[in-house]
Image (tube, rainbow, N blue to C red):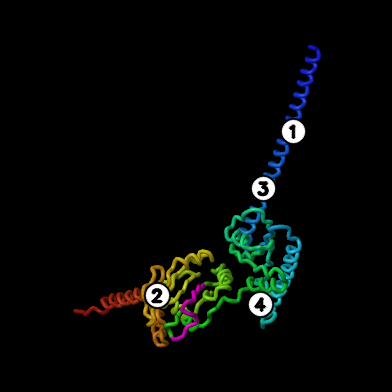
Amino acid sequence: MSINLRSILLYILLIYIIVKNINCSISNGKRTVYKRKETYQKRNENAYDKFQERTLKKLRTENGRLLLVVCKSKCLKERADIAAWLSEYNKKSSINSQNFHKEINETHEEATKNVSKSTYQPLGIYVHYYQKSFPIAEIERKIKKSSKQVIAFYVADGKEFQIPDKDLTRKEMFLQWLEAYEHPTNIILLKEAIELDEWLNNECNEVTRRSLDQTVILVIHDIEICPEPLLKNFARSFMNRSNYVAVELRRPLSAENEFILKWRLKGISEMCRIVVLIRRNGFTELSPDITVTEFYQTISNISQTGINQNCTIMNQPQKMQEIMPQLNPIELEFFKEERHLKSIEQNRQYLAVGTIGGVAVMALAMSIFWGLNGNDFVPKK
């Protein structure tokens, strides 16, 4: 009896040890699986973070333009199609750039020089696989808003423009949209003084080229010395905004244009590159390095300039200054000549010549005076 009881106890102990070992093995196995899973997830997250960093670095350091394709899932076909279309566009643009100056009457030397200046820089493409929130808020908002699996952005100088979903389905529509954003045609280049006057006028003047509700960004720059790099971006952002206009005035300006600017936009700076916001009958000078985003923030912070039915100015907001009225031809000629005379008076070369001439005259007078007091001119007693 005691032997059987002892055997039973030994069996129970043995079973307990075996079960415990099995539980430990299972537990260790689970821990191993969990650790492997955590390690894999961490590696995957680290890899994605590095991938996202590469995307951001590409967007920040890319000189000029970039086509960003965001894929929410596998997008092999769409990715291949867009890359092929872009390659075709780059080749065509490069050929057009080389042939551009052959269409006008230039010498061979001039054409070669100009072609080298206007060589087309191919538009690059970058694919980003979307797994978690994109760090650029504007792009993230547009990604979430779209129900499509592929979203494409045209990025130029740090500003992104979403390509409409419908334009990603057909090659012709894609190329047409891309051409419009690569070479915006809605920049108005002013050449004559009368054009500048008419853009500065509002509906209260006799002739104007803008409506009362239009907002104009006027860029004055020298495209060789101090070009405005974001002028095209302003034009791109205005494509779907009929009440915004980009106007360009290139230096060197004619004497008449220079005077009109100084007269009508009182207090405007003397810098090589000037950016001016014009709204109704008021204007404000912006930073020459202002971005498109900062421009729209400035717009939202400036209240409407008031004009009543009689075209008299009501309350001007602090940041806006009044645009001076247009001069008639006689006034323009008079003030222009007066300004020219003042510039001559203040010219250091003329001052130096005048000073030297004055000293020379005084020296001549003194020498004559001393000569008259010499022995030959003293009366003899």
Of mark 2 and mark 1, the one earlier in the sequence is 1
The residue indicated by pointer 2 is 306
Crowd around label 2: few <14 · some 14–19 · many ≥20 (10 Å): some
Element carrying mark 3: helix
Packing grade of label 1 (10 A; few <14, some 14-19, many >=20) is few
* Residue lying at 60% horizontally and 64% vertically, measured from the top left: 160
Give x and y (percent) for residue 231: 56, 70
Q: Which residue is depicted at the point 34% across and 73% down?
A: 359
Of label 3 and label 1, which has the lower sequence position? 1
Label 4 vs label 1, nearer the camera: 1
Gap between marks 4 and 1 measured at Cα: 82 Å
Question: Quick one: label 3 or label 4, which is nearer the N terminus?
Answer: 3
Look at label 3 and name its amino acid.
Glu
Residue that badge 1 annotates? 26
Q: Which residues are magenta?
A: 206-220
- Asked if the stretch drawn in magenta spans residue 218, the answer is yes
Which tag, 2 or 4, sits closer to the chain's start? 4
**How far is mark 2 from mark 1, CA to CA?**
79 Å
